[in-house]
Structure formats: C-alpha cells, structure tokens
Amino acid sequence: MSDTPNEKNFMREKVVKPPIDKRRAAGRILCYVLFAVVFGGVAAVSFVVSLPTAKKILGKDQPATSAPITIERDQDPSGEPTPVETMAETTGEGIRSEDLKDEVEKIVLTRSPEMVYTLIELGLLDAFLKKRMPEPWRLHRLGSIQRKAMPRWAALCCALEKFGCIDSAEEFLAALRLDSRTIRCCSNAEVLVKQPKPADKAAWKRALCAYGVDSVSCAAQCYDAFSGGGSARELRAVLKSGECFSMKHLAVTGDDLLELGLRGRELGDMLRFLLDYVMEYPANNRRELLLTLARGTEE
C-alpha cells in the first residue's frame, strides 16, 4: 500500500529549535551569579562561626612564625664523628701525641688518606711540622699504596719531607710516639727513595741485605706511588725467587771460614765478599764452591 502525498511530506519535515532569546539567556546568567554569591557568603559565615570551636577541639593556636629550616652536615654512615671532626673538637682542650698518632693513622688507612691535608690546614699538626704543606696533590698518591700502616706512614713522611715540612721521618714519627720498628723502616724507606731505584735483581738484593724486607717493601711502594713503574712487582719477583740476599741464606758460615784459619775482621770481610758474589751469581751459592773461592782469595 503506497503512501499518500500528505504522509510523505510529514515524514520529511525537520524539527527546528527556536532561536535563543537574549533576555532569557541574560536572566539565566544573572541567576547563576546570584546563587554563587549566596552560597559563597553562607560558606564564609559558616567558617567564621565554626573556627573557634574547631580550635578548641583540635588544639591551641599555633605560632604565626614558622620554625627556621636547617640542613645538617653530612655524617658518617655509622653515625660516629669522623677522625677529623673528633680531632678538631679536642684541639682547644689539647691532645696527647699518642692520641694524635692514633687519629692520624685512622685517616691514613682510609680510602682517602689525602684527608691528612685537612689536618695540616687546620693546624692540628703544627707542633710536629716545620711548615704547612702548600698543596695536597702529592698526598693523593697515598691511596695507591697498600692499606697497611707502615707503607702509608713511609709515603706520608716522604711527601712531607719533599715539601720541607719535616727534617726527617725519624724525628717526625718519634715526636708522634710511633713504635721503633715503624720509625726504623720508614726512615730507611726515606733514605732509599732519595736514591735511584734499583736497576736489577742484584741491586734489589743488596738493598734487601742493607735495609731488610719491610723497609725495602715500603720504599718500593713509594717509588710506584710517586714516580710510577713496577718496583713492587720487581721486588716480589726477587723475594719469590728464593735467591740469597742475607748471611743466613749463604751456603757457608763463619764456622766454615774459621776452619780455613780466618779470624776477626778478615772473617767478616770474607763473608761479605762471598755474599756479594752470591747476590750477583745466585746459582753459585754452593758450599764447596764458596769454600774453594775463599781459599783462593785467601792465598
């Protein structure tokens, strides 16, 4: 069944909204503004009325000024004061040489031994120094040295002596009341560092013979720290070889030379001659060969 013309026209008609009336829109806006003013006024009055009650319930009035904000200085993770802080606090009261030595050694054995320069700047070591160190760059080399007291003390003394802050390691360490073994080894290391580095195994063995293992080990580490090179590695190779560098490792003894008729100074000179020969030719450290050499030399 087909649609009539009137029905088709009805289906095609569109609903069009009437245009907005300006007066009506202005009225709506004014109404919204009035509502906002009324609600804001009610909120303000409610806040003023309830404020005294809220203060009584929640607590007393707080001061108008806020507390100043302070930032504390970084501290050691353990919560304990650092050796530098401890020493700085006790300087005014005085500090004994033994206590000062202990505190300096704590710093020297840390991963940042160059912090000793802070003590020098603060004047905590003035009683033991001729003058203060002008710059800290040489102390930064101490961190490359094995973290043991003796080599680090030796390196510190070498650095201080280089800048004229001390006359000798012996005087400086004795004033700080270090033990005699440390004083001896550091003094020997200071003497060795002033000399050219041993050029070969025989030279290293002569140094070991004259100064001992501890002193030469300290000197070797100071060589590496201040001048570079592989001195410590060379020394380890000599020690590992087991070659003779002292009288106790020599294949002959004083009794053997007594049987050859040597006495007194001649006996001592012969032992030193044989030791020097063996240090130069380590494979010849044999009793019969050395006795033959002693007989031939005596004749």
Image (tube, grey):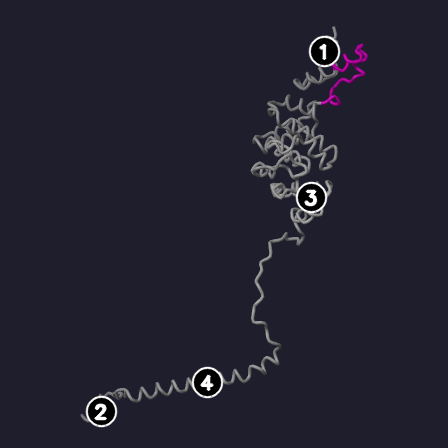
Residue at the image position 79 percent from the left and 15 percent from the top: 256
Q: Secondary structure at mark 1?
A: helix
Q: Position of residue 152 (x, y in %)?
A: 65, 36
Relative to residue 253, is residue 46 depicted above or below?
Answer: below
Q: Quadrant of the C terminus?
A: top right
Disc on the earlier residue, 1 or 4: 4
Q: Position of residue 144 (x, y in %)?
A: 60, 37
Q: Nearer the viewer, residue 5 or 147?
A: 147
Residue furthest to the left: 5
Disc on the earlier residue, 3 or 2: 2
Q: CA distance from mark 2 to mark 4?
A: 54 Å
Is 269 magenta? The answer is yes
Q: CA distance from mark 3 to mark 2?
A: 106 Å
Q: Label 1, on which residue?
A: 293
Residue at the image position 58 percent from the left and 60 percent from the top: 70
Q: Quadrant of residue 120?
A: top right
Q: Which residues are magenta?
A: 246-270
The residue mark sitting in front, 2 or 4, is 4
Residue furthest to the top: 299
Q: Label 4, on which residue?
A: 41
Q: Position of residue 81 (x, y in %)?
A: 66, 51
Q: Secondary structure at mark 4?
A: helix
The answer to whether marks 3 and 4 mark residues whose Cβ atoms lie closer than 8 Å is no
Q: Secondary structure at mark 2?
A: helix
Q: Position of residue 35 (x, y in %)?
A: 41, 87
Q: CA distance from mark 3 to mark 1?
A: 55 Å
Q: Quadrant of the N terminus?
A: bottom left
